[in-house]
Image (tube, helix red, strand yellow):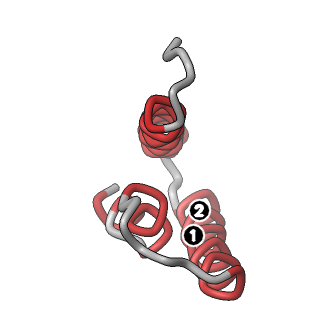
Amino acid sequence: MDKILKLKLFRLLSESSLKVTNEEMQNAYGCFMEQVRAISQSEQNYSETFRILNITRIELVFIESLYQYGQGEKCA
């Protein structure tokens, strides 16, 4: 699980001070998707796969709420 959360994509999304190019974001997203695919295909325990993907979703929702808060929008 930590392997996914330590990917460059999460760092790029969570650090607002970084200037990110489209190419950097596309590469980071590509690496993220490769990790998700690898976990989905390698885990024989479906509850473990579900747990990993659910925690990843929660992390992405949290980052989204940080972005909305920084833009002056209401948080859910």
User: Tag 1's secondary structure?
Assistant: helix
Point out the frontmost of discs 2 and 1.
1
Q: Is residue 59 left or right of residue 61?
A: left
Q: Name the kind of residue labelled 2 in the image.
A: Val
Q: Residues within 10 Å of mark 2 (few under 14, many from 20)?
A: some
Q: Give the image location of residue 10, x and y in percent.
A: 43, 61
Q: Is residue 69 left or right of residue 68?
A: left
Separation of residues labelled 2 and 1 (CA atoms): 6 Å
Q: Give the image location of residue 14, x and y in percent.
A: 39, 55
Image quadrant assignment for residue 51? top left
Above or below, 41 relative to 25: above
- The residue wearing badge 1 is 32
Q: Give the image location of residue 43, x and y in percent.
A: 51, 57
Q: Nearer the viewer, residue 22 or 57?
A: 22
Taking the spot 44% from the left edge, 45% from the top edge, the residue there is 52
- The residue wearing badge 2 is 36
Above or below, 27 relative to 33: below
Taking the spot 70% from the left edge, 87% from the top edge, the residue there is 23
Taking the spot 34% from the left edge, 55% from the top edge, the residue there is 1
Q: Is residue 71 left or right of residue 10?
A: right
Q: Nearer the viewer, residue 49 or 17?
A: 17
